[in-house]
Image (cartoon, rainbow, N blue to C red):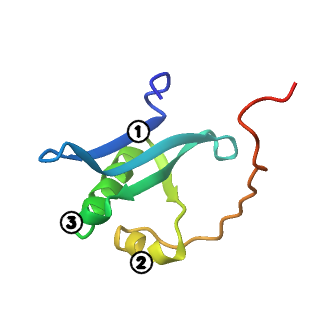
Amino acid sequence: MRAAPHIYHVLVIVDKTTDRIVAVGTVFMERKFLRGLGTVGHIEDIAVDKKQQGKKLGLRIINALTYISENSGAYKTILNCSEDNIPFYQKCGYEKKESEMAKYAPTRSHSPKL
């Protein structure tokens, strides 16, 4: 991420009283060849400590990441979420659009086989 500071933007909220991370999120910027090299912001890895939920930390992270994306020139900002989280992201101004497909790589051992 240090090698590409204009691509990856990570936000962390720390509870200063406990010196613990209580919320995190990332937006990374992708250039789209078929869109004239326009930029899309991808929001990823949103997490809020269960004990801190209900304090609008998730909303603050999403709003900040959206701001970064838009001010970095993105023509849109997107994210994937579970069905249960759709109402939260709608409150943040996002709308449901299309579907996601995934293909997971097979589990591999951590050591190479020679």
Q: Residue at x 71, y 63 (%)?
A: 101
Measured from the top left, where is residue 11 in percent x and y? 33, 43
Measured from the top left, where is residue 5 in percent x and y? 43, 28
Which comes before the other along the chain, label 1 or label 3? 1
The mark found on residue 9 in the picture is 1
Q: Quadrant of residue 33?
A: top right
Label 3 SS: loop
Q: Residue at x 71, y 59 (%)?
A: 102
The residue carrying mark 3 is 55
Number of other residues with Cα within 10 Å of mark 1, as a class: few under 14, some 14 to 19, many 20 or more = some
Kind of residue at badge 2: Pro
Vertical order, 10 against 48 (above or below): above
Vertical order, 2 against 100 (above or below): above
Outermost residue to the left? 17
The mark found on residue 87 in the picture is 2
> Is 40 displayed left or right of 21 in the figure?
right
Label 2 SS: helix
> Is 85 displayed left or right of 33 in the figure?
left
Identify which residue, 86 or 68, lies in the foreground.
Answer: 86
Q: Residue at x 26, y 59 (%)?
A: 57
Identify which residue, 16 or 5, lies in the foreground.
Answer: 16
Cα separation between marks 2 and 1? 25 Å
Vertical order, 113 against 101 (above or below): above
Q: Residue at x 38, y 53 (%)?
A: 66
Outermost residue to the right? 114
Nearest to viewer (mark 1 / mark 3)? 3
Kind of residue at badge 1: His
Disc 3 to disc 2: CB gap under 8 Å: no
Measured from the top left, where is residue 85 in percent x and y? 45, 73
Identify which residue, 54 or 9, lies in the foreground.
Answer: 54
